[in-house]
Every structure is written in structure tokens, then in C-alpha cells.
Image (tube, rainbow, N blue to C red):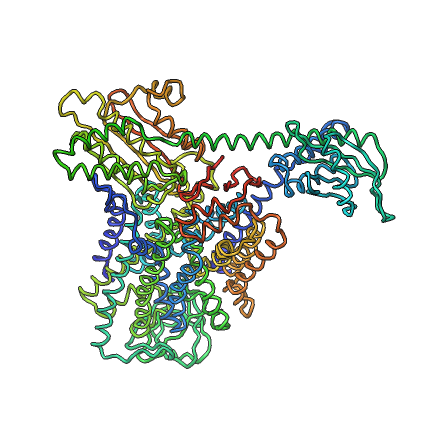
Amino acid sequence: MGAGEMSAFVAGLCVAALPLLAAGFWLGRRTARTRSLAGLGTPVEHATFETLHTASLAAPPLRAGLTEETARKAARRLRTLLGTDALCLTDHEAVLAWDGAGEHHRAQIVERVAGPLETGRGEAFRLTCEEPDCPLRWAVVAPLTVDDRVHGALVACAPGESAVLVRAAGEVARWVSVQLELADLDRSRTRLIEAEIKALRAQISPHFVFNSLAVIASFVRTDPERARELLLEFADFTRYSFRRHGDFTTLADELHAIDHYLALVRARFGDRLSVTLQIAPEVLPVTLPFLCLQPLVENAVKHGLEGRIVSAGGKCHIGITAQDAGAEALVVIEDDGAGMDPELLRRILAGEVGPSGGIGLGNVDERLRQVYGDDHGLVIETAVGAGMKITARLPKYQPGVHSGGRMPAER
Amino acid sequence: MNSAYTVPAVALVVVATVLVGAFGLRISRTTSDFYVASRTVGPRLNAAAISGEYLSAASFLGIAGLVLVQGPDMLWYPVGYTAGYLVLLLFVAAPLRRSGAYTLPDFAEARLASQAVRRLAGAFVVGVGWLYLLPQLQGAGLTLSVLTDAPDWLGGVIVAAVVVATVAAGGMRSITFVQAFQYWLKLTALLVPALFLVLAWQHDGADRPVFDEPAALREQRVVRVDDTLDLRLGHPLGVTATGTVDGRRYDGEHVDLPAGTHRVDRGTELALTAGDPVPAADHGSNGMSTALAEGREQRPLYATYGLILATFLGTMGLPHVVVRFYTSPHGVAARRTTVVVLALVGAFYLLPPVYGALGRLYAPELALTGDADAAVLLLPDRMIGGLGGDLLGALVAGGAFAAFLSTASGVTMAVAGVLTQDVLPSRGVGHFRLGTALAMAVPLAASMLVGGLPVADAVGLAFAVSASSFCPLLVLGIWWRRLTPPGAAAGMLVGGGSALAAVAATMVGHPAGGGLYALLAWPALWSVPLAFLTMVLVSLATPGKVPAGTPAILARFHLPEELAGGQVRGAAPDVPEEGEDDTWARVR
């Protein structure tokens, strides 16, 4: 074999190794999940493990509520748990899933389940069947109740009467009910988060409205053209912040809103305020929670001009930077103003200090965490007298975040 | 070749790339002019960026070499490379942009809401990226060694170092401008010398090149054979040999070689006389252009179709191309961008065949030594000579390095992004540097290790793998509502996996030739249908696994953005279903 062939062989090996590595990775993850319990403890303990394991497998689908899909996934596990020939889960109208033999009993079951679903009490009854070799002669109905309301029923079918099965079916039904209650809880938590996001939706501060109108009023006589322009800026900004569709916006739109905002602020403070922009155009289409940068800029303006109003000619400089950083956009807003005691800031962000401390930062931080996860909160560098630098990392893609739709993402 | 001008030219390109990357044009604006600063990238700028990133070493050097060695059949390469964007335009561009996905794994997650498919797509991105990086590094090595007698590996190491340094240092802050700059640089570097070369050719009064005849020498030329090879002669040929031919030593003696195959050992010098047809080399050639020649000759029709399919359908799965579309503000802009890309790329691809054709006239012996890829670099010196030739040569060399740098940095960033996001455990921003180093280290090591490998085909093979994994995912994902996560995963594994396996077999095996070799060397023709078929069948077999929000997601893909906001709300189901993972996209 020549040197060329040898190296070609090595290259081929490298390429061939790729799918092998991928397959190995996948297999490893697969097998790691379902570790065998065999050989652990006494047979009784082993049986307990088995039961608990089966129950734990049935739990995840049920946590999504009672639908055909989840019932189908859970019914298989539940039948293993009960060890019966057939098991089905129903809601008020129909059989959601049937696992095991004798599916021709569906209609009959639906008929007989109506009673227990009404009363919420379990029942056992005999099944009539035309087919001679059908193993199902007897069925136990155990209702599934969530918050005292009957959601459906678990029906276990067996060849003959069995007190053990009645008891076991009752216990399993209770366990399933608990899972469904948890699913309900999950749903209310999602709703709560949505409501919270809605509540957190930044509002423009009333002070800003008053101040802007006052500034515009001051120009009406001296410079009507300027006043008209400012009024239009004000209209644009309020239109943006009052818009109703969508919780998300693009960085470009948010920057436009900041532009309108700064135009009004500049009208008030004149050339005491200077702004530097460094925007990488690649990140302009990034989707981000609505009005989550404007409060930061407002904060920077406030801090930058704080304590300088008295001293004539005190100038403030604000820098806004948006960088492209691979799969993320890095937005930095800094001012050279009064800064803040880091300890106080920590308490504000933790919600220990009242709204006067600065509701903007805490609100933005909380929304970013809810949308992108806890590692995407604001990073704030500050000290007294040293200005403030706020960094936000915005992923370019996050499941469920679209500037068009109204989709809160939950992680 | 005079390196007095080329080294500064290459250095200039590197420095310009770093500078434009670090400062950009808009990033240094220090006014408060929001309107200008927050203007999104227009279709023309973005299209230039996409083209700059797309036109790689294979386009800049490889096509001319292929045309030189194998004649007009190879014109399918530029056609395929361009037409890939037509398919992208028709089926993918706008919906892909509207999906909000930044990378291909993002798209998989957005469409199928499955972490498993996402990770699989990530693995293929890394695989395709590495296959694509390999020839860039090798091309850089070849360029530098042709121009300056540097060792083969040096060019690759320089490109790798520059790319890793700029990308890892966050230096590609204004990548759109860098890549757009690179496109115009590459176009200039090919266009200006091409004009002079055509003028020189006209002035020369040479015959118009006849492609169908074997390339013939116009003057006496001494060819030094760097690597042992087999010569196939259709007619007897008289040469003056210094070295070993057919096991016999010669020392400047005249040899009459009869028709047939002759083995020429490494280091032999053959002096060919004017008017002789240039014999073709069999094996041992290490260029980008000659590797799969055998397969193509045996199955020309099949190979051509394989090539067409791979390049037509593979473009949409190139990771560094896909991420550029994110820069477009909306779907319509993405579509417009693609149209401009078609024009820009099409214009560029008119030039390499010119070099190939002129190379057949003026430097046909390159086909013999396996350095056919150097044709573009050597022609200015060969045809014009003097200071002018040197300057034009330096321009071409600079353009070639721009090609390596832009494509390599784009692919490296895409691969590094996937490595950081989906493979390496998350540990903050600094982690991206590790991903970058890793993304470049593997192909660099491979390019050093497998110096003699026919790597330009790695570009074709990267296209084949991409066409058999990402093309079905994108096309079915966008146009077929019954696609399921298991179906997508199976299709990608079967199609992409088998294409990868065929690639590996081609690289390892030197199969004895025949139908099997052609099948393995051009896998796209069977692996793409296989991938589609698997994806469709497995999806149909698992109807219960269609992701819950599919109608809403597809509505968002296909409706204009202003409409989609309302539509998504209307079409969404009330209760989200729980997927296998917590990160199930909830559509409400």
C-alpha cells in the first residue's frame, strides 16, 4: 500500500467514524435512560421497583392531561401495572384508548360507564359477549376525578370476578387522578406565566407623557414646526408602545421606538445628552420581547442626567451597541452617569426594594429570564459614580418566539 | 513564479479581511442617526455577502482545473453550483426566513419540535461543514506552494490560524460587509486578469481552442512529475526523459513510448515537443480536479446526473449559506436576495471556464503533473509575463486567498455555532472560542494527515451529503404537513448516512472501478431519492407523531409576516400536547 492509499484510508476512516460516533452517542443515551434494575434487592423489593418503574413510565404522558394521544401512551403502562387482559381509558363521550384484547366491547363499555361517570362511584359488572373465545367476561370501572369533577374512567377487564382487581383498579385510578390533577396544575401554571408576562408588559411611564407634552407645549409658540415634529414623534412612540398584537418585536423596530423616545428626551435636555450607536446590521432582525430595551435606555438617561441637572452644562453620554455573536445578539447600553451601589441594585432586582428604585430594570430582567431562560438575564456592571453598563444576550432563535405571533415560551 | 508581489498581495487580503471584519463600515458610526444605523441589510448587500461566502476554492481554482483536464463536460459544475440557488429560491428561501430559524438545527426544532431531530441535524451540519472545510485548507496549501515554494501544509495552517483568530476574537462583527467585500474582491481578481488574458490570446493569434481534441502543447515544455503516475497514451509519443520510465532509468535520452500505459516515477522530468498531445495521468494526481475522472469516464451520463442532483439540491443545506438568510428582514427580502445571488454567482461562474479553456491552450502539461488547479494562478505569468504578469498573478493569488478565507470563516462559524450550542456543554460566551478551535482543528488535522487525498471531490461529496440529508428535511418540512420527527430523523440518517458511507468508501477504497465505483463516487442520484422515500414512508407509518402545532407552523412559513401574526393565533390548537421534551414549542 502506497503512502497515498494509506492516507486515503485514514481519511475514509475519519469520515466513516462520524456516523458511527453519532450512532454510539444515541445508543449510549438510550441505554443510559433505561437502566435495568435486575439483581437489586430481594424479589419482593424487585417487584416493588418494577411497579414503581412502570408507574413512573406512565406518569409523563398523563401529565399532559387526558387526550387520545396521552391515553394511548399511558394505557399500555397501566395495563402492565394491573396485569389484566384489557384496559381502557374513557372520557365522558368515548373510549380514548384501548389496550389489550377484546376491542369489540368498546360500545358496550361506553354504555355501561355512563352511570359511574354520573355518580362518581366505582362499579363492577359482567360483560356479555357473542364470541366464544373472548377472554373478557367481567369489567371494573373506576372513575378519574380531578377537583371533585369526574373527568373520565379507567376500565379494567378480566376473565372472571376478582376482588383484588377491584381494589387495584381503584388505587390505580386514584393515582391516575393525581397525575391529572398535576396536569391541571401545570396548565394553570402556564396560564399564570402568560398572565404574568402580560402584566409585566412594560408600560410607558406617566411622567414621560407629562414631560413630553410639556416640552411640546413650550415649543408651540416659539417653534411650531419643531412642535409638530415632536408631536409626531410622540404619536409614533405611543402607537408602538400601545400596540396590541404580539409580545415580541424585532430589534429594528425597538430601535426605532428608542429613536422616537430619544428625540423627545433631547428636546427636553438639548445638547446635554449625546448618544452613540454601534449596530451590526446582522442582528436587526432578532426577535425580542416587546419594549425591553427602551426601559434600559430610559434608565440610562435618568441615571446619566441624575445629579447633573444642577451643575450647569453637565453632559451625559449614552452608548447603545448591538453586536453579532454567533447564535446570539449582544446588546449593550451604557451611560457615564451617577451609577449605583451594586448592593442596592441587587436588592432592586431581587424585588426587595420598592418600585421607586427602578421598576424598569427588574421588569426587563424578569421578562428576559422568562422568555430565554435563567442564564439570559441582564448583566449589569456599575458602581457609585462610575456609570452603568447593561448587557443583554438575545438568542437569534428561541422556540416559540416570533415577532408575529403571540406565543409565550416556557422553559 | 515571482513571489515578490504575491506575498504582499496575500498579506494585503488577510489584513483587509481582518480590518473590515473588525471595524466594518456601519459599526464605527458615531452619530445618533438611528435611521441609518438601524437600517436592515438590503437584498443587494446581503446577496453579495452570500455569494462571497459561497464562492470557495473549488469555484475559484477547481473549475478551471477541471475544464483544463477534462474539457467542456465539466461546465456542469458551474451550472450546478449556480442552479442550486434556483431551487433554494423556488422552494426554501422565504419560508426558511419566516420560520425564524438561524441555523439548520433551529429549523428542525422550529418545524418538528423535537430535540432529537435537532441534535441529528446538528451532527450533519458538523459533518458537512468539515467535509467542506477540508478542500479549502488544501486549496490554500496548494496555492501557497505553487506561488512561493512553501511547504504544502503552510497555506492551510495560515488560513486556519487567521480564521480561528478572527472568529474567536469576535472579529467578524460585521461579517456581512466582510463577505460582500470578499465577493467583489474575488470577482475583480478573476475578471481583470481574464480580460488581459483574453486580449493576450487574441493578440497571440492562436487557434480557437477546440475542446473535443486532446489538449496539445504549443511549444516545447519540460514537465517534472512530482508523484509517481501512470500515463495513458492513445498514440505513440516521443519524449526526452530524465528519470525512471517503466522501470528503466534515462538520463536526457529520447524515448519513443508506444500507445498504452506507462509508469513514470516520482522526480522524472519529461521534455515534450510542440504539437504533442498531452497524455492523461491515471492516478497519484493530488489536485482538486482529477480525482474522480476514472469514474466519470466509465459512467459519464450517470456521473453527470449525480453531479447535477447533488449541486442542485445540496446548496440549500450548506450551513454557512443558510445562516446568511437570517440577515434578511423578512421572507420577501430573502427571496429577492436569492434572485440577486443568482445573478452575482452566475456572473462569477462565467470566468473560471475562460481560464480552463485558455489553460488547455497555454498550460496543458498541468494535466500531467496533477497541478491543474494551479492553472488560474499560473496563466498570467505564462501568457503575459513580465511585471504585468506578476501583478496580475498577485491579484489572482489575493483573490484565491479571499476565497479560502471567506468560505472557511463562514463554515467555521456555522460549525462552531452548532458545536457550542448543541454538542459542548454550555458554559457561557467564552465557550464559542473553544467551539471555533475545535471546528477548525479537525479538518486541519485531516488535511495534514491525508495530504494526497483527492479533496476537491470533498466539496462535491459535501454537496451530496447535504443534498441527501438537509434537502429532504427542508423541502418536506416546508411543503408537507404530515412530516413527523421519527420520519425526519430516519430520512436524514438513511440518506445522509448512506451518502457519508459512500463518501468514506470512495475515499478509502479505490474500488476496482465499474458500476459500483460510480455509484459510490456520485451517491446523490440514489441517496437523495432514498432519503425522501424513507422520510415519507416513516412519516406515514407514524401518523400519531405529527407535531401538534403543524398547521400553525406551516401557516407562518408560507404567509407574509403581517398576515401570519393573526393567522397563527387563529389556527393554533387550544391545548398544546406534551412532546418528549420540555422545550416543545407551545403554539397558542
Q: Is residue B102 above or below residue A200?
A: below
Quarter of the rendering containing residue A55: top right
Residue at the spot 75% in from the left edge and 39% down from the top edge:
A87
Relative image position of residue B54 (x, y in whole percent): 36, 57
Observer able to see residue A50? no
Q: Could you tell me how many numbered marks the image carries?
A: 0
Relative image position of residue B163 (x, y in whole percent): 34, 47
Please give left or right for residue B83 compared with residue B123 in the image: left
Q: Nearer the viewer, residue B357 or A126?
A: A126
Relative image position of residue B242 (x, y in whole percent): 35, 71
Residue at the spot 24% in from the left edge and 70% down from the top edge:
B197
Quarter of the rendering containing residue B384: bottom left
Farthest left residue in view: A222
Q: Nearer the viewer, residue B545 or B235?
A: B545
Please give left or right for residue A90 compared with residue A217 in the image: right
Q: Is residue A216 above or below residue B145?
A: above
Residue at the spot 30% in from the left edge and 65% down from the top edge:
B347
Residue at the spot 26% in from the left edge and 40% down from the top edge:
A278
Q: Nearer the viewer, residue A3 or B161?
A: B161
Relative image position of residue A212 (x, y in whole percent): 23, 31
Farthest right residue in view: A132
Please give left or right for residue A102 compared with residue A176 in the image: right
Q: Quadrant of the N terminus of chain B?
A: bottom left
Observer able to see residue B566? yes
